[in-house]
Amino acid sequence: PTGDSVGGRLKTEDPWTLEQYGKYIASWVAGWNQRYNVPLYAVSLQNESTFENPFNSMTFMRNQAGGQDFNQYAMGLKSVKDAWDLFGLETKIKGPHVAHFNASPGNPFGLWWQNEMIAGVKNHPDAGLIGFLDFYNANYYNGTSANNNKNVLGFWLGWQQVVPGEWGWHRPPGVAGDGKPVWFSETGDGGGGTWTSQITTPLKMHNALVYGQGSAYIYWQFADGGGLSQHNLLAESQVTNPLQSKKYAAFKQFSRHVRPGARRVAAEFPNGWSTFGTADPFNSASGLNASAFVHEEDERVTVVLVNMRPNAETVDLVLGEGPAVSSFEVFRTSATESYASLAAVPVTNGQATLTVPARSVVTLSGSFDAEPVDEAMLWEALAAFLGLEAERLQAGQVLPVEATLEGGNWVLRFEQAAALAHGELILEWSDDLETWHRDGLTVETASGDGGTTAWTVSRPVGAEDRFFFRFRVEG
């Protein structure tokens, strides 16, 4: 019966086999970690879990009688969960891992398979099983049509929030409330043809991240022996000069700037959508498309514009609330350019203007402006630290310091009145009041009466006949 040929199936009806399956996956993960000393971050039980592949694999949608049974995936996942608990593994699990979410709301068979297996996990007697599934994961061999975008957004939001009148025999409930990121862990597009076909690389990345709410987009592979295909970004001959590949250059427009830890934020045209210039806002393949990302740790804002239209478009970019940016670096890939670095675009009063050529992808990346220094707050903080009034400190009040020469060292002693409220205290020394140094000082502190701190700063006597030191407050 279907499911027993080529790909095969897991014999979930046999308790011993089911138990060994989880231990097999666990031993493989543990063996990898030990052999390569690179811990696996996440694994999937089965690539394309509803598709009969011609390699060592199986499907998770048929029982031993050949009947359709989406609980099979949950049974396999439970076996793996038990093995993870037994061996103390921390590698995360992604799944159920169907091949795609095709084809349309009226016939959403790929989406149906994914949702049915998730439902099986949620309804399993082990109530903690759904928590063991860290990411909802699927491959992204989706097309670029409006229907495909409706399907992936429907997976996230549910049918009632996405063209409710178009859904047919399966109405996705939506997973936005499940608290799990969505990964697309095998993707492909474009082939080795012209830029007209290869521009689908950034378009599908946009679709997966925006409509699909994706947190990860992982290409099938970067390079393979032979020429360029749907499954790779580089031909063998392009590895030493990767920008020869338009697919690689277009992929880099996202991957170089939208780094792990970035958070996607709203990027909307006046129509309220991320796609402009089409009657159907899901028809990204014919429009100008925008996505935006903020990376708090890297302190960067990134905007990616994918123009599928036959004409150049002028874009007035208006930054909303959030970190201020003074200018954007600009990179572009088109029929004649491969990740070309262009002149920076200035930001004036939170607005920037640029032109996006026909059938091109443009990335703008800008660093956060430095926070303005509150000088009054800085003086107050330093004055409290030194036990002086801010006005006297600004007027040049000298800090009471005891200075002695002891055993070949200059020794300075002073008392700190209070903790520094903001920033970090840096001590520096100089023998000419022009060049200041941070090395060569030995600093000791001890708690004093009334919450004070006694400082002792020493430095070996050198060739200098005079010695200065100063405080710097950074941050």
Image (cartoon, rainbow, N blue to C red):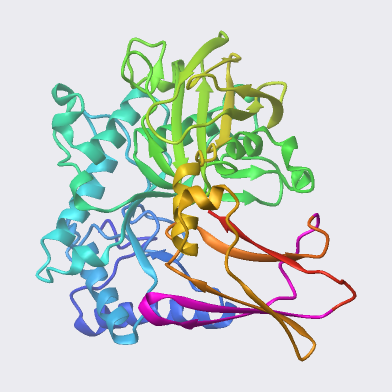
- Point out the image quarter for the N terminus: bottom left
Taking the spot 15% from the left edge, 41% from the top edge, the residue there is 173
Quadrant for residue 161, please give it. Answer: top left
Image check: 20 left or right of 426?
A: left
Residue that extends furthest to the right in the rendered view of this protein: 463
Relative depth, front residue between 98 and 66: 98
State which region is magenta. 434-461
Residue that extends furthest to the bottom in the rendered view of this protein: 407
> Residue 254: x and y, percent?
55, 38
Q: Determine if the magenta segment contains residue 354.
A: no
- Regarding residue 121, the answer to whether it shows in the image is yes
Relative depth, front residue between 292 and 289: 292
Taking the spot 25% from the left edge, 73% from the top edge, the residue there is 11
Taking the spot 58% from the left edge, 25% from the top edge, the residue there is 361
- Regarding residue 338, the answer to whether it shows in the image is no
Image check: 235 left or right of 345?
A: right
Relative depth, front residue between 426 and 278: 426
Taking the spot 15% from the left edge, 54% from the top edge, the residue there is 119
- Does residue 58 sit above or below 189 in this rendering? below
> Residue 93: x and y, percent?
34, 65
> Residue 179: x and y, percent?
23, 53
- Does residue 115 sit above or below 89 in this rendering? above
> Residue 31: x and y, percent?
49, 82
- Does residue 227 sit above or below 280 in this rendering? below
